[in-house]
Image (spheres, coloured by chain):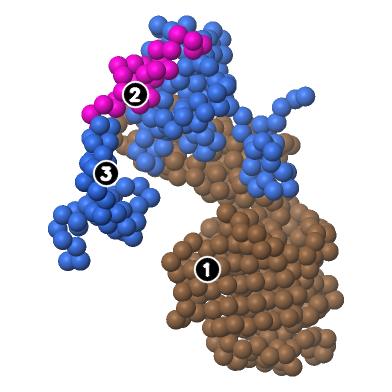
Chain colours: A blue, B brown
Amino acid sequence: MYYAKPLAKLVGELEKLPGIGPKSAQRLAFHILRSSEEESRRLVDAIADVKTHIKMCPVCFNFTDKDTCDICRDPKRDRSILCVVAEPRDLVAMEKTNEYKGLYHVLGGVISPMDGVGPEMLKIRELLARFKQDEIKEVIIATNPTIEGDATAMYLADLLKKTFGTDIKVSRIAHGMPVGGDLDYADQATLIQALEWRREM
Amino acid sequence: MRITKLHLSNFRNYMDETIEPGDGVNLFVGPNGQGKSAILEAAYVLTTSKSHRTAKDSDLIRIGSDWARILAEVDRVEREEVILELTLSRNEKKTVRINRVKHEKVGDIVGQLNTVIFSSADLEMVKSDPSHRRRFMNLEISQVSPQYIYALGRYKRVLEQRNSVLKEAKFGSVNMKALEVWDEQLVNYGSIMIEKRMVFLRRLSEMAEPIYSRLAGGSEVMEADYHPSFELGDPKSIEEIKEIFHKAVINARENDLARRTTTRGPHRDDISFKVNGMEVRSFGSQGQQRSVALAVKLAEIELLEDMIGETPVALLDDVGAELDEYRRQQVFDLVVGRCQALVTATSLRELPEQVVELSQVFNVSAGTVEKT
């Protein structure tokens, strides 16, 4: 046994975190051990707080500490547009643009049978239910351009068209060349996709 | 296209060796187990990012070392000179540098150095199961088409996902919608592969035919036909391929569900090599099979030359032992004066005299290479 039992326990817990290997876990554990009582107390409280106060917004399924999240309650938001994302972190990325003023819906993943994720495990029923109350006119699907993101987008687009026909406009965000990117430096897959998604001028 | 410098560090039995091949034929001579084939293998790894002799990258690292590196300077006519570098490690993922710039995807190296390898595996390609022939198509088309690499990578992943849906289906009724989203992508990426394979084989067949006649000396006619996993007919465009492929996938759905796997698509393709209309795999003699394998490889040199505008580097691994005198002569007739060639042999006597006279000879002994 290299560590005293409580220390081994901490290292073990930290190791379970994504992106943390045994070395990092050990470094973090020793750091926590050396930190002041107050500092480590703040970390403990922060973890406990997240678990007790953060829940899913029952409307869009983003994380929130309120009954309904800030975006869903914001009266200045355009309620006719809905952006569908896979994960809360994708919503954060969209928000950082400061350009998008509509509402969101977080699916909680993408369809991936290999990982046991079928469409019924995503918040798709909840998405359809939103059309009953809100005055949504347009849906922007913002899943990643991976095989799974593409499949999820196709599934949603198909479902929305079947359910609502032409009443609702459905689009997908464009993929391809990064802004300021040089054609010369783009990898081939990106260029091929940019070609696929080209638009008329 | 020429390799002007090849540097091996901890690769196979080499510690640190630099080889500077000449423009024409380069003969690597020495007893077995000294590292002759490893030189050709190194060039092949830079072509495809993988070895043709082993599936395990760790086999390529010298015993006692944690890593291995291959570096080559390649002189190209149509494009500027390039420095390729591939590093293998026992603990980390392999990495690739092109002109000293690190690339995220190892596959980016494919297409930089074009080679055609002649080895005992060629006969396998003709004789063995279809997976060998699909692998052949994938490797060769990837050398000239980045779009093919892209479609192939995506297709493999879609196939895995779709097969997962089919496997799960046994636990209850399948959600048809859940299958359909994969069908669409299967057809999209698969059709790109099918189209490229059709064009590739049509041209390869055209070029192999006269070469085969020369090898077989006379009246025999060979052809290479593409065999898709469904009735394809003679489609005129990729749109038409998509349409036919999509119908085939829909028609095979019940079968797919029963077998719990995807039964239609380029992952079930095959090539049929025929001599005088007869399937050479089942009905050909050993000699015919050898000639077909060789004709295909020689045709590949011409095809690559046609597609990239310059000759690839020919890698001839132990052709002395593999081929009879007549076929050997034919190979050298086509290669000498045309391509740079790296050739291994246990003895100079295995090779035609005129070839040896024109060649740069290197002695290979226990992981050292010496120019004579």
Residue type beneath disc 2: Thr
Residue A62 in the magenta stretch? The answer is: yes
B334 vs A136, left or right, is right
x, y percent for residue B56: 47, 68
Could you say which is closer to the camera, residue B227 or residue B46? Answer: B46
CA–CA distance in space, label 1 to label 3: 44 Å
Identify the element where label 3 is drawn.
Answer: helix
Q: Are marks 3 and 2 on the same chain?
A: yes
* Label 1 chain ID: B
* Drawn side of residue B233 relative to residue A91, left or right: right
Residue positioned 47% across, 23% down in the render = A84
Q: Chain of mark 2?
A: A
Q: Give the residue drawn at x 58%, y 48%.
A: B152
Residue A159 place in picture, x, y as percent: 47, 19
Quadrant location, the C terminus of chain A: top right
Mark nearer the N terminus (3 vs 2): 3
Q: Residues within 10 Å of mark 2 (few under 14, many from 20)?
A: some
Amino acid type at mark 3:
Glu
Cα–Cα span, label 1 and label 2: 46 Å
Q: Which residue is mark 1?
A: B88
Q: Quadrant of residue B290?
A: bottom right
- Which x, y percent locates residue A76? 49, 10
Specify start and end residues of the magenta stretch as a single range: A51-78
Q: Return the residue at label 3.
A: A39
Callout 1, which amino acid? Leu
Q: In the displayed structure, would residue B362 be above or below residue B294?
A: below
Whether label 1 touches label 3, CB < 8 Å = no
